[in-house]
Amino acid sequence: MQFDLLVKGGRLIDPVSGVDALRDVAIANGRVAAIDADIPAASAAQTVHATGCIVAPGLVDLHSHVYWGGTSLGVDADRLAAKSGTTTFIDAGSAGAGNFLGFRRHVMERSKVRILAYVNISFAGIFGFSQTVSVGECGDLRLCEPREVVAAAREHADVVVGVKVRSGKHAGGTSGIAPVDLALEAADRAGLPLMAHIDEPPPGRSEVLPRLRRGDILTHCFRPFPNAPVFASGMVRPDMRLARERGVIFDLGHGMGSFDFDVARAMLAEGLAPDVISSDVHLYCVDGPAFDILVCMSKLMALGMPLVEVLRAATQAPAQAIARPDLGTLAVGTVGDVAVLRQRSGRFTFIDAVGASLTADQRLVSEGIVIGGTWWPNEAADHDETERFEAHADHTHVEVAARHFGHRHE
């Protein structure tokens, strides 16, 4: 056989190349070997029929928490991959320098799906996160040691994509802006971007944003009040515009408490769409409101963001943010990572982090993924996933959950 796998009959959308057309994608030896309008099925050992589906580069979730078993908030990336269309998970600081080797040895190297990571400025990573425990990892500045972060980043340079800091009252207690400054020191010395989380002040958004450099990532860019990016009037705050003009990357980072539909509407109305759509999926939002990156993408589509731009924000943009141009695109010679998606029609109620609802007539679902040339179907029963999704649309339940978690966690 000429090819190992053929994805046939789908609508290929690759924002990098600008392709949006019916194309077959053939894979050999883990890489894309051919893209054409009609590649014979007989030329491949296995054929995945994608008629009526969107064939896209494998999704890259820039903000997730997948140190499963090593941290209290971690989820199992392999269990989430096929049903979310995700072929690359970027862990956003679950591990610090003190436990990064364990993350690599026991999770990354055993996972079928690709996992890369930001190293947390806190030596212990995110260690105090549960329904009953909330201890910010940056509350004790003795844990924030830039030299340890730089050493870990250099030792694990093949999987480390940046430095992570969670700043705010809940993540940092009374430490204020200091964790951000220490994380910037580490990122600068290591030659890596910084991903900055902001929860409730202090520090305020106006302290954090001016410090971020071109290529640094502001996650939770559509977070609710306080530290929201818009005034009560809906006008976008000037520091957000200046950050965008300076080249700071805006990342959605939905999570449990960091996506407000009203904020999103205001930002989108002013032309400030997120550069990157990520889920911030962890144990306390994997069953809602975030679920996974496909639900987050569907919410942005419901708010008016075009399909191609939504796909760009989950493929090309995150791959660029982590300087991995081999990911997030489908062209001859690139990594054979593919997401086979479908736009499902119906009536869907989406919930944000503060309990507000949004009704849409479609959402994206996954038929399966190709990782390194191997087909991995979404074996979750459609009705089970729909029931799980719709059950979360109980508005009262979500309002209670949002009040409980939304002001404490990501």
Image: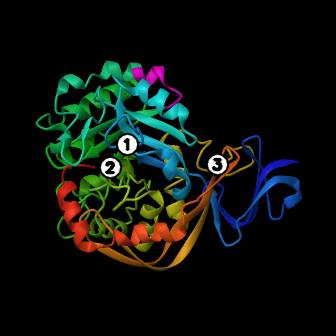
Nearest to the eye among marks 2 and 3: give it. Answer: 3
Would residue 16 appear left or right of 200 to someone viewing this image?
A: right
Helix, strand or loop under label 2 = helix
Q: In the rendered structure, which amino acid carries the disc numbered 1?
A: Gly
Kind of residue indicated by mark 3: Asp
Q: Position of residue 53 (x, y in %)?
A: 65, 68
Q: Which residue is mark 1?
A: 74
The residue that label 2 is drawn on is 243
Where is residue 34? Give x, y as percent: 79, 52
Which stretch is magenta? 152-159
Q: Nearer the viewer, mark 3 or mark 1?
A: 1
At mark 3, the secondary structure is: loop
Q: Nearer the viewer, mark 2 or mark 1?
A: 1
Query: Does residue 34 appear to the left or right of 175 in the view shown?
Result: right
Pointer 3 residue: 337
| Residue at 24% in and 42% down | 208
Sequence-wise, which precedes: disc 3 or disc 1? 1
Q: Which of these two is toward me, 387 or 356?
A: 387
Q: Is residue 371 visible?
A: yes
Cα distance in 3D space between marks 2 and 1: 31 Å
* Picture quadrant of residue 73: top left
Q: Amino acid at mark 2?
A: Ala
